[in-house]
Image (cartoon, grey):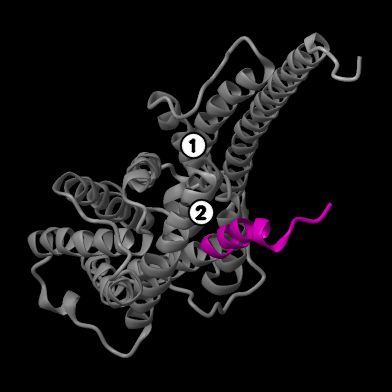
Amino acid sequence: MSLPMGAKKPYLAVILIQTIYAGMILLSKAVLSRGAMNSYVFMFYRQLVGTVFLVPLALIFERKNAERLSFVIFCKIFMLAFLGITLALNVFCLGLVYTSATLGAATTNCLPVTTFLFAVLLRMEKVTIKTIPGIAKVVGLAVCMAGVATLAFYGGPQLNPSIHYPFLGNHDNQRDHQAHASFGKTWILGCFLLFLSIVSWGLWLVLQAQVLKSYPSKLKFTSLQCLFSASQSFIVAIALERDPHQWKLGWDIKLFTVVYCGTLVTGVSYYLQAWVIEKKGPIFQAMSTPLNLIFTIIGCVFLLGEVISLGSVLGGILLAVSLYSVLWGKSKEQSADNGGNALQVQAEKECDELKETEVTDGEPSVFV
């Protein structure tokens, strides 16, 4: 049975979001691996472009109907910007320098599991271990950890790409995979940083859903996060990078990457993400992340020319299995809850009808 157009919009939105994220990973890896731009400076520029892109739109479209911003909400948005953007993305970019684009996309499959875990801790989701759906959720968490360990500690044979002159290729890819094959400290550190960024990102998604309930102006909400993260990223960049050459932008791939990430990622995808979270919840948004891995693997082969290892493929498969194990358990619990609610409503309806019948039978007839 086909869904109506209104019901399809969240699904189309998450596909677009993951496509944009895959482009972000590929372009970021191409720029950062060459050493052409410092990762902290890159984060500041992309958030600055996102702020310049979003703030005028927020002033135009939500100037009259935007919710009043209290001091408490102001502080919450400031902390959300630090947790889910400044901290998560700075750590992610640094981990991407030490590893590969494929691994960066694969670790994003941990996002639904970490999001679900935080949702359980904050009592937004429930786990009943005595039921099969509850066991499926717990198994999903365990498989997720196994996938992360596989990505970090198992290299395996390399799958060579068929294209040897990629569009965005760089000379550091071979070095990255040699480090992976030898299980160097740099690769393991990169894996840890990527996982840390996903944990921070998952907590951000859950807390974001809570804040949106009290401040539903999504465009202004996203604009404020961009503004706060830009100021935070500037402080981080100016403290850790003093070389003026790293701050220069020309008409090259660096500028294109900054504009792409600032407008499409920070601007468009963050707004769509807030919209999807409001409509379907944070778990639904997180469950679409395997699409990111598929799109990124294709891009790695045809655009970056990366050598994909068997360990990355197996780890990605384990993370996808963990994702859908949690998703299956959640869907079964929702079906059971909906069925129970339907039975309760039907029972209440029958009880009301029975009472009305008894009252009608007890009334004297006027035709006697």
Q: Which quarter of the picture shows residue 51?
A: bottom left
Residue pictured at 38% horizontal, 46% vertical: 194
Task: Determine the main secondary structure of the stretch shown in magenta.
Answer: helix
Q: Quadrant of residue 222?
A: bottom left
Q: Are marks 1 and 2 in contact (CB under 8 Å)?
A: no
Quadrant holding the C terminus: top right
Residue depicted at 28% across the width and 77% down the height:
56
Closer to the camera: disc 1 or disc 2? 2
Q: Which of the two labelled residues, at mark 1 and mark 2, occupies the earlier sequence position?
A: 1
**How packed is label 1: few (under 14 Cα within 10 Å), some, or many (20 or more)?**
many
Residue drawn at the location 75% of the way across and 55% of the way down = 3
Can you identify the residue that label 1 sits on? 148
- Percent of width and height locating residue 91: 29, 51
- Distance between the Cα atoms at labels 1 and 2? 27 Å
Give the image location of residue 162, x and y in percent: 67, 70
In this rendering, position of residue 133 left or right of residue 170? right
Q: Is residue 308 visible?
A: no
Work out whether 126 lies above or below 44.
above
| Callout 2 amino acid | Val
Q: Which residues are magenta?
A: 1-17
The answer to whether residue 300 is left or right of residue 84 is right
Q: Secondary structure at mark 2?
A: helix
Residue 246 marker = none
SS state under label 1: helix
Frontmost residue, 356 versus 156: 356
Q: Is residue 169 magenta?
A: no
Q: Which mark is residue 276?
A: 2
